[in-house]
Amino acid sequence: FPSHDKMFVKYAEHGEGDVLCEGKYIGSREGKYGANYEVDNSGTIYSLPSTGQLEKIFEGRVQRGDYVRVTYRGKKAIETGKLAGKEVHGFKVEVDDEKRENVSF
């Protein structure tokens, strides 16, 4: 098997607008604190810890093998509901697959 380097992405080390990773989405893997979404960029695996927003995006709209770019949008407070006022991480995930349209959400 080829060797892969693994990079665990720490959101606190990034600023708004930083591209966290870009490459082929290879799936999720259960980690110590829940799911990690893994993106392969030329043999370097970027492991993104799950958040509510990432779970909705990766479980609902991204397929294994899709080429993705994940951009950090910073922390923002939830405005409504029972979690109002709690700060959460925000992301922009773009999918670029030659057989699919470019999608941004």
Image (cartoon, rainbow, N blue to C red):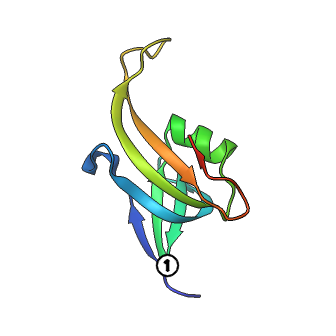
Q: Quadrant of the N terminus?
A: bottom right
Tag 1: amino acid: Gly
- Identify which residue is drawn at 54% across, 51% down: 94
Q: What element carries label 1?
A: loop
Residue 81: x and y in percent read 50, 11
Residue nearer the viewer, 29 or 24: 24
Q: Quadrant of residue 68?
A: bottom right
Residue located beneath label 1 in the image: 43
Residue at coordinates 54% horizontally, 87% vertically from top-left? 2
Q: Where is residue 55 in the image (x, y as percent from the top left)?
A: 58, 41
Judging depth in this view, the residue of 57 and 103 nearest the camera is 103
Which residue is pictured at 26% across the width and 50% down the height? 13
Q: In this view, does 101 lie to the left or right of 94?
A: right
Q: Residue furthest bottom?
A: 1
The reply to whether residue 59 is in sight is: yes
Say which residue appears at 43% left-offset and 60% top-offset.
21
